[in-house]
Amino acid sequence: MTDTERILLGHGGGGRLSRNLIENEIVTRFGGKGPLAGLPDGARLQLGGETLVFSTDSFVVSPLEFPGGDIGKLAVHGTVNDVSVSGAVPLWLSLALIIEEGLEMNTLRRILDSIRTASEEIGVQVVTGDTKVVARGQCDGIYINTAGIGRAIPGLNTAVNKILPGDAVIASGTLGDHGMAVMAAREKLTLNNALESDTASVHRLVAAVSQWADRVKFMRDPTRGGAAAVLGEIVENSSFGISLREESIPYNPDARAVAEVLGIDLLHVASEGRMLLVCSPDIADSLLQSWKKLPEGAGAAIIGEVTEEAGRVVLETQIGGRRMVDIPQGELLPRIC
Amino acid sequence: MKYIDGFRNHRTARVITEEIHELAEQAGDARLMEVCGSHTMSIARYGIRKILPRSVRLISGPGCPVCVTDAAYIDAAVELAGKGIHVATFGDMLKVPGSSGTLAGARSEGAHIHVCYSPLDALRIAAENPSEQVVFLAIGFETTIPPVISILKRAAAQNIQNVSILTAFKLVPPALEALADDRDVAVNGFLLPPHVSAIIGAGAYRGFVRDYRLPGVIAGFEPLDILLGVRDLLQQLAEGKAELVNQYERVVREQGNRIALALMDHYLKTADASWRGIGTIPGSGLVLREEFLNYDATVKFGVSVQGGKPDMRCRCGDVLRGIIFPDECPLFNTECTPVSPVGPCMVSSEGSCAAYFKYSR
């Protein structure tokens, strides 16, 4: 039996292996048509005159609690963000818990409190749920699944095929903080810094751009696989490419330090409270200013533009060189020397 | 990060690049080999090839420990894992193909494979599982060897007896000589590895540079370090010189790190070593001395590191010797990709093929 006949950890890394798994095994069975076509973050569903957005996400982060957040907060933000970047106002959440025998009750209480606080801040309601307990060793503390429903914002219907060369690429803040914070916590890297996860809801960032609905072409929260995976995905099979300026990309110095030590490219690292957006160049500056007025958009920056170089994401490096930005392949592995 | 950013300064880079273009005209065609995998990655990551003149070609050498690891070594590691032994390893080794399988495959079938950031993790795993055996995959060059060996010292001090190592340590200077002797390689100068040099010292290359009349520059991993290294090599070529330049004086001393060298000498002795795709290079490896064979996993568990059968179509050996560029291999980006690598150069984040795949397709 070859390696590819079993599930590898890399199949869950958000990179090329994950894509292959989803496209070859899931889309082929459930059809790539209708709301599932193009595998958006959230399905757009017509119900009478109303358009609803429906999305789901599961959370298995280890450690359960990390600087800047915990699995509960993440479970709310992750699904809320998927609904939000699909162009909707998030309204309702489901909450399913798979709990390992032996989890401390106080840990569970903290996680549930954190879910309550996060959903209250956003204004979403937990409306249904489920609880299962499995024997010790059959899951890692607690796994959480949430699903979310939101109401589509009229006119805000992004589509990759609306993107044109010259369009601006905007990031709502520093990239990769979440992944680096979790990795540093997991590996107990004592780098003497206060790096925190960026986990947050992007719903207000989405609301802020709705005034330019017709000129916003693309929105996505760069989670697993990072900005590289998101941008790589939209240029794939497209007639345009993207050029990024390394100097313009906002990074947290502490995240950079951790990435530097581990030999990881921050463009491959997950954020959990950020957005990438592509829009017409004429509104880029106004949109940026509107984001900068929000605390969650304070670090926003125009990081590049859409080019005619079809299918390629290219980075203009700090020293004036150029290189390709690839979709991460599988697991993020530390370098060895 | 401020300190590091100084070595990535855009304006300084432009000044050095201009100098490089001027010197290149006098130096003629230059084939410069960067021996270290981290150099390869840095060159690709900062797009350095794109700003160099066409007459200057940077060729990647065999300085990625994962890339030169024999298929037989992977087979032995998979065999150990199959016996229920915990295998602790740096992450890059997981996907390296052996004769038939990989460690990642073994892990998905239930083997105890632990990805480590530090060799100390192996010691921790051994201490936490006193009734189990733990083997650390001890690969690497002079940079990695001392920290790996240091766990043996600690194991003895803490009386941890269930840890051992599977050695495939490699040495850089004998590899340089083998490359310089190899007529197919035809290199004009070497960009020498900075961290290896921090251990062995700049002095370790003086004989090589003199005997082979090939310029060598020890350069750091930051883009400006690399550009300065290239400039110094071109300057020597333009002037017809062959000298050793230590461009990385902020880290590398003439004598190296004496404590690390003494530690290595205490536990290890030189031996011939097999380099994947290249073959056996005399005196280019280090193995445990007789008195420490109780830490040698091959002895402890009766496995042998011999007779691996890598995919013969893989041209990693030619890539590692700088004879072809990665994209000249017929498997590159067809059968061989980072997701399903055929050769180790496509696996390691520091491998030439991976660097090409990632940054320069």
Image (spheres, coloured by chain):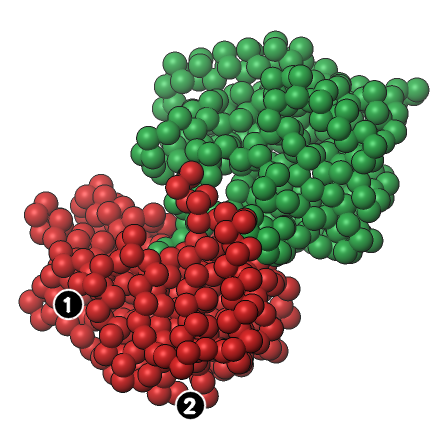
Chain colours: A green, B red
User: Mark 2 packing: few (<14 Cα in 10 Å), some, or many (20+)?
Assistant: few
Residue B360 locus on image (x, y percent): 61, 63
Q: Which of pointers 1 and 2 lies earlier in the amino acid sequence? A: 2
Would residue A193 appear left or right of B301 to someone viewing this image?
A: right
Query: Dot 1 lies on which element?
Result: strand
Asked if B239 appears above or below A147 in the picture, the reply is below
What amino acid type is highlighted by mark number 2? Arg
Residue A129 locus on image (x, y percent): 61, 18
Residue B220 visible within the image: yes
Q: Residue at x 70, y 48 (%)?
A: A243
Which mark, by number, is residue B287? none
Asked if A172 appears above or below B23 in the picture, the reply is above
Q: Which residue is mark 2?
A: B183
Residue B143 visible within the image: no
Query: Dot 2 lies on which element?
Result: loop
Q: Which residue is mark 1?
A: B268
User: Mark 1 packing: few (<14 Cα in 10 Å), some, or many (20+)?
Assistant: many
What amino acid type is highlighted by mark number 1? Leu
